[in-house]
Amino acid sequence: MDPLTHGLSGALLAKADLKRWGKTAFLALVIGALLPDIDHFPLRLMGGEFYLKYHRGLTHSFLGSIPLSLGLAFITKGLGRRLWEEGVPFPILFLLSLLGVYTHIFLDLITSFGTMLLYPFSKERFSLNLVFIIDPYVTLLFLIPLFFKKPHPARASLLLFSLYLLLATVNREHALKETRSKARLEGIKVERMEAYPAPFSPFNWMTISEGSDRYYILRMNILSSNNPGPFEIYRKGMDPYIQISMKDEAAKTYLWFAEFPLIRSKKVDGLWMVEYFDLRFYTYPPRRPFLLRLYMDRDGKVVRKEGTLELPIRW
């Protein structure tokens, strides 16, 4: 999720029941809730391929969370003693830091980008596909209780957030059920299907169904009487240039990362351009984030690469 929501989640936990540990606990939780994204900026500087490979990797894993939390506990203990003369025990600060880091990991897990929880033992990306990467309702849910002095609104907010995730789970299953029914009525043979949250409402969803030679996208609002709309159909491409491009390391990385890769090729300025796009991120058309373009000469040699790391809105 976005940095603001991550930071607010740590503040909300501190407000809910951890006030007795003072400002040092607040600091540990808020920084811990932001800390895993420390990998974001160096990976972007290293390029798109590194970003796709390693973002939400070690710093977002169960193993990586331990040194992050130990380092943060050491820093916050020193700051707490100097700034506020609070002698919070180191084990407490470690657990609070770990709680903040795990809160960050969980909030990323409920989105669709994918989080490598078991890295470096496994590079599998886990995602629950329940909440869009920026959700104003979640942000407000975490923000509003911070204006109250007592902890009860913060506790109520955590309960409401749990119910919000339950609603998202029910809506996701409904979207998949509607898609299966529509595909069956239209005689579409589906090999694989997934549902993704769309922006601005927990009732907006996009499903992607994969057939043997094409993808079918269905956009819907669960509350709409005209639900669902027509399928958007995208034919899978495969030609000699696409086949050659798939041997490139950038393409291999992209195909490892993508869940529903749409690959197209066309001639551009005397070169063949092969474009890779993961339909999973087409929740906010006409924007197409996470594009990879490979330009090849007549002999199939890649002479130029282009890519974008923009998410549907940001982060």
Image (spheres, grey):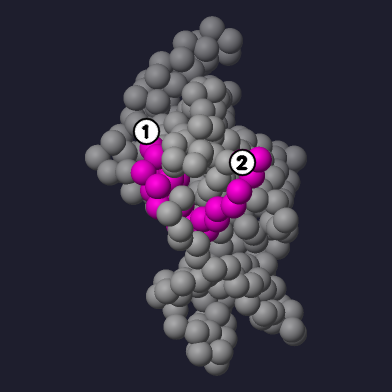
Where residue 210 sits in the image (x, y, percent)? 47, 71
Q: Quick check: 204 above or below 247?
A: below
Highlighted magenta segment, given as a residue range: 242-270
Q: Residue at x 60, y 62 (%)?
A: 197
Q: Which residue is mark 1?
A: 58
Marks 2 and 1: CB-CB under 8 Å? no
Amino acid type of the residue that numbered disc 1 sits on in the rendered structure: Leu
Quadrant, the N terminus:
top right
Q: Residue 151 versus residue 266: which sits nearer the camera? A: 266
The quadrant in which residue 65 appears is top left
**Viewport quadrant of the C terminus:** top right
What amino acid does circle 2 point to?
Answer: Gly
Q: Nearer the viewer, residue 129 or 163?
A: 129
8 left or right of 29?
right
Sequence-first disc among 2 and 1: 1
Residue count near mark 2 (Cα–Cα under 10 Å), binned few <14, some 14–19, many ≥20: few
The picture places residue 48, in percent across and down from the top left corner, at 51, 33
How far is mark 2 from mark 1, CA to CA? 42 Å
Q: Is residue 261 magenta?
A: yes
Task: State the residue position of label 2.
Answer: 270
**Looking at this view, is 54 or 80 the one in front?**
54
Look at discs 2 and 1 and give the one toward the viewer. Answer: 2
Residue sitting at x 44%, y 42%: 300
- Residue 128, how many percent across, how many down? 46, 58
* Picture quadrant of residue 11: top right
